[in-house]
Each structure stands twice: as C-alpha cells, then as structure tokens.
Image: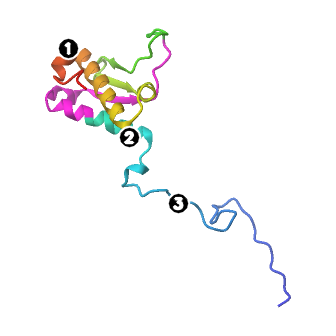
C-alpha cells in the first residue's frame, strides 16, 4: 500500500472536469426556451415576424431577401447626424433585391422588446415602401400608429 500513485500525464486532449472538480459547465437553459436565444437571434425573429406580417398583404415580398447586419458600413453613403436603421440593395446580376435592418442602431434606440419590435416593423415597412416605390401607409395601413 505504500506504492506512490504516479502523476497523471497531462496532454493536449479535452478537459473532462474543471479545476475545482465539479465538472464542466453546461448550458444555462435548454435550447427550446427563449432564454437560450441570443440577442441577435431574437432580433432576427422580430424581423422575420414583421416580414411575415407584410407578406400576407404583399406576396411579391417573397422575391426579396431580408438581412440583419450588426451595423452599417462606413462607406460614406450616410451623414454624421443620423445613423441609418435600415437600407435597400437593388436586384442585379441575378441576385434578388435585399432589405437590410441594422441591429445595433435599432437596439440602442429602444428600451424593451415591445418598443424594439415596433421600431423593427417601422424600419421594415419603410424599406419595403422604398423598394416598391410606395408610401409606408400604403404598405402597412397601421404604419405610424402606436
């Protein structure tokens, strides 16, 4: 019984336990609950909800791609006074037209989920209206209502 235990070889393999011996941390919440969704995923869901709402009235929106980007590019197309919340990219070279919603500028301007959802819908409606050459009120009759 006096035989010493040889030290375990430490290799580059995966760690099985943390340094305090309680095991590796797992996810905080299961993937099917809203807590598990990241802010970017939740924002993309808001954009998708808004698009689905508009597609019922405007079926031609199925031919338009809707994208969520973090922030607008610094290419000089916007001035220093106002950061754009969204934009449009015309169809060309076989690519469909695109509507872009910028996540960080929208999040900074809103306080809660309901306010964020309302602003996202306004941005989507304005960009779709610009793409179709219509007024926002024509695209969504409830545009501008609180």
Q: Which circle marks residue 71 in the picture?
A: none
> Residue at label 2?
42
Position of residue 124 measured from the top left corner of the image (x, y, whole percent):
29, 25
Q: In the rendered structure, which segment of residues is drawn in magenta?
A: 50-75
> Residue at label 1?
135
- Quarter of image, res 59: top left
Q: CA distance from mark 1 to mark 2?
A: 28 Å
For the residue pair 133 and 136, the one nearer the viewer reads as: 136
The residue carrying pointer 3 sits among few (fewer than 14), some (14 to 19) or many (20 or more) residues within 10 Å by Cα, namely few
The residue carrying pointer 1 sits among few (fewer than 14), some (14 to 19) or many (20 or more) residues within 10 Å by Cα, namely some
As drawn, 8 above or below 35: below
Query: Looking at the image, can residue 95 be seen?
Result: no
Q: CA distance from mark 2 to mark 3?
A: 21 Å
Position of residue 18 measured from the top left corner of the image (x, y, whole percent):
65, 62
Which image quarter holds the N terminus? bottom right
Give the residue drawn at x 42%, y 50%.
Answer: 35
Position of residue 37 measured from the top left corner of the image (x, y, whole percent):
41, 47
> Residue at label 3?
26
Q: Secondary structure at mark 3?
A: loop
């Amino acid at each position: 019984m006096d035989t010493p235990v040889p030290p375990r070889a430490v290799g580059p393999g995966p760690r099985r336990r943390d340094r305090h011996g309680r095991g590796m941390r797992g996810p905080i919440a299961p993937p099917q609950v809203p807590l598990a969704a990241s802010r970017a995923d939740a924002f993309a869901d808001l954009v998708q909800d808004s698009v689905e709402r508009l597609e019922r009235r405007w079926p031609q929106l199925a031919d338009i791609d809707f994208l969520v980007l973090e922030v607008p590019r610094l290419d000089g197309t916007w001035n220093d006074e106002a950061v754009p919340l969204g934009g449009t990219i015309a169809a060309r070279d076989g690519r469909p037209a695109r509507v872009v919603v910028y996540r960080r500028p929208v999040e900074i301007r809103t306080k809660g989920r309901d306010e964020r959802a309302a602003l996202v819908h306004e941005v989507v409606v304005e960009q779709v209206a610009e793409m179709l050459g219509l007024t926002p009120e024509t695209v969504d009759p409830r545009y501008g209502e609180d």
